[in-house]
Image (spheres, grey):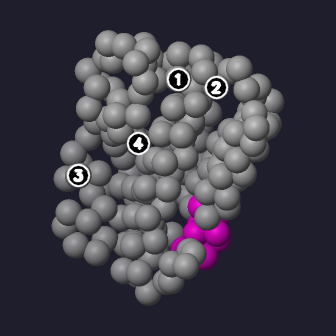
Amino acid sequence: MDHLILDSLRRRMRAMHSLYYDAVATMTVDHVNHVERDGVLPIAFSLFHYTNMEDATFMVLAGEAPIWNDEWQERVGMAVNDHGKERTVAEMMEQRITGYDAFCEYQRTVFSRTEAWLETLELDHLSELMVPRPLPDMVANTYSARVAGEAGITRLDGIECWMYQHGLRHMGEIELGRGFVGLGGMTS
């Protein structure tokens, strides 16, 4: 039974990442930077936000520094050099990607690192407490706070909430955005 938990987690993360790979492979920079109307964020926001958040979350879950740095910013050319978690929709309406191929490389680098780490993860690491209660203000009103157990947020909670469920949420936004630019959804 223990093996099933890790195996399922690894397969779900690979499957979710494969949706992102399929999405970027079937879009152009014009698709991802399209603005449907004011208040509807471009696909560029969801793509960068999720990838950059998975990169940043790795610090908490695995203890390794994020990959994103000034060199990546120069290559990818994000209009707003921020994942946007603490910014308004109005601020993030300006999000655009100029170096689309470089963005795809950054995404592959982040996702590959996560998948390699998950392959080395042992079952007893999943129960380790990452954010103890009382939860800090910046976490207290998040989805992961609703999922957290009595002691707080475990590594498994973090992987499930901050990576897997968060990634699927933004994939839904990407699929909706693809419809705005005349592309189809990723799955049925």
Q: Which residue is drawn at the image coordinates 41% and 42% (left, top)?
A: 83
Specify the label residue 154 is tagged with: 1
Check disc 3 and give the amino acid type.
Answer: Val
Q: Which residue is mark 3?
A: 89
Check disc 2 and give the amino acid type.
Answer: Leu
Position of 67 relative to 90 (above/below):
above
Instruction: Describe the element under mark 4 as helix, strand or loop.
Output: loop
Tag 2 or tag 1, which sits nearer the N-term? 2
Query: Are discs 4 and 3 less than 8 Å apart at CB?
Result: no
- Give percent across and percent down for residue 173: 40, 64
Q: CA distance from mark 1 to mark 4?
A: 23 Å
- Local crowd at mark 3 within 10 Å, few (<14), some, or many (≥20)? some
Give yes or no for residue 26 being in the magenta stretch. yes
Specify the label residue 126 is tagged with: 2
Query: Are discs 1 and 2 less than 8 Å apart at CB?
Result: yes
Q: CA distance from mark 2 to mark 4?
A: 26 Å
Instruction: Describe the element under mark 2 as helix, strand or loop.
Output: loop
Please state if 109 lies on the left or on the right of 134 as rendered: right
Tag 3 or tag 4, which sits nearer the N-term? 4
Q: Which residue is mark 4?
A: 83
Residue segment shown in magenta: 20-28
Considering the whole magenta stretch, tell me its main secondary structure: helix
Check disc 1 and give the amino acid type.
Answer: Thr
Query: Are discs 2 and 3 less than 8 Å apart at CB?
Result: no
Give yes or no for residue 52 being in the magenta stretch. no
Please state if 122 lies on the left or on the right of 9 as rendered: right
Tag 4 or tag 2, which sits nearer the N-term? 4
